[in-house]
Image: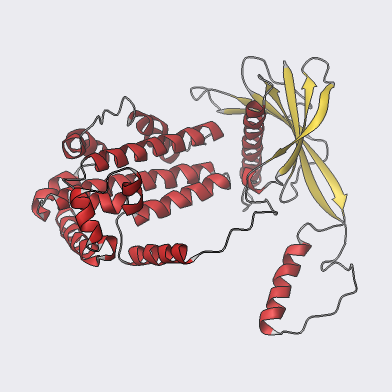
Amino acid sequence: MVHLTCFVLLPRALAWPDGTAMTVLGASEIEVPPFALRTDSPMIGPPDRWWVQIIFHQRAVAARRDDEAFDLVHAVMHERTGAATAARPPGATLFSPDEHRETVVELTMPLPHDDEQHLEVALARGLDALRDADRATIIASDAAQTPVAPGDVWPIVPCVRRDAVTGQTLGLPQIIVLENNQLRDRPVPDELDEEAIAGVETALGAMQARHPFMRWMEWLLAAEEARITTHPEDAILRLSIAVEVMLDAVFALSLWERGDGASDAAPALRLDLAARIKRHFSALLGGSWDRTRPPVGPWSNDLAYLRGRVVHRGHRPSSAEVAAAFSAADVLHRYIVDRVIARRSRIPKTALLLVGPKQLKQRGAWDGAVRRLGEDGGLANDDWLLSYDRWRGEVDAIVS
């Protein structure tokens, strides 16, 4: 057995004394408490469950990490406004070089398999344990602070492998680069060309016209942001909202487009999402909508059920659970797109709104009613959105 030890620089100093050790033991949900914290220094966890050993190192330093960020903002302000700036001698730092404290955390975890994928999985588990330990510290001290999020740690993480018995280092140190919001050297995007700018204008117009699928995209982007910054609860809640918004829009648009009046559609739209899927989706879109089997089953198990655990039980999703939830949402979205394309002759407006002309052409589905409507104005014709929006308002008034 091999252990992995990583060294993480935190975004702020913690209150733990230098050299303090803690081991976080994993436990199944039926056990209480869900995490057992031990302050025996140091302690290696038992082989029958996962564990993370945390050791806090406090170091006094003089340099500030973000001087250059302020200098950049300061220079832009001077360029744009001409505001006078105080002269500083070459090499002078903007902030006082007074000594302050930084916290580096040593994380040690078991490494069942020695490959790149398991290195990242092990580090993710260590960062989750660190987050939970900091949460517990804040709760115990009744402090008004935000816990250290894995997405806020310094992204350059040196790691070493150690023999589980002797503790000796195996091989050379390795660097793991985290894809989080602290990466300073981000790639510079290409400038928008005319076609891309036109796409931005279309998207803005669709947002202002309350395009039924724009909110799905906005919530999906918000979920991706929470995943990147490693706020797992927020990521799951936002992703769940995104998927439910998409499902609701597909369902309501299909009813509207086939000509259901507001009073006819209200009973179906009054049902909760699970009942709608069970009773109506197969008739509207065809295909299999069994929530116990793929392609709908993973969404039900890995996202919908997980969302309930987060909301009702305060569950803390692991990195693996978040990844599974996003995968399930992607599978469900692809399946819905496939079903809408298959029914495009019956619901061409829904197909144009959900899939869009570009993807319809790529999928060989730019034909029949879809093509006639698309070439006659397509998404630029706000009457579609206005008509649907008024119809949905009438339905909502009945349902409420």
Q: Quadrant of the C terminus?
A: bottom left
Q: Is residue 273 above or below residue 222?
A: above
Side of 186 relative to 210 (left or right):
right
Instruction: Residue at 9%, 54% (x, y): give it.
Output: 261
| Residue at the image point whose x is 20% and y is 66% from the top | 383
How many dots with numbers? 0
Q: In screen coordinates, is 208 left or right of 231? A: left
One can see residue 245 in this view: no
Q: Position of residue 65 (x, y in %)?
A: 78, 57
- Taking the spot 61% from the left edge, 44% from the top edge, the residue there is 139
The colour mode here is secondary structure
* 225 shown above or below 116: below
Residue 396 rendering spot, x and y as whole percentages: 19, 56
Quadrant occupied by the N terminus: top right
Displayed quadrant of residue 117: top right
Task: Residue 202: tell me if it is visible.
Answer: yes
User: Relative to the observer, which residue lies in front, 308 or 77?
Assistant: 77
**Position of residue 104 measured from the top left corner of the image (x, y, whole percent):** 78, 42
> Which is more toward the observer, 388 or 24?
388
* Nearer-the-camera pick, 254 or 280: 254
Above or below — where is 161 with respect to 48? below
Horizontal and vertical percent position of residue 174: 77, 33
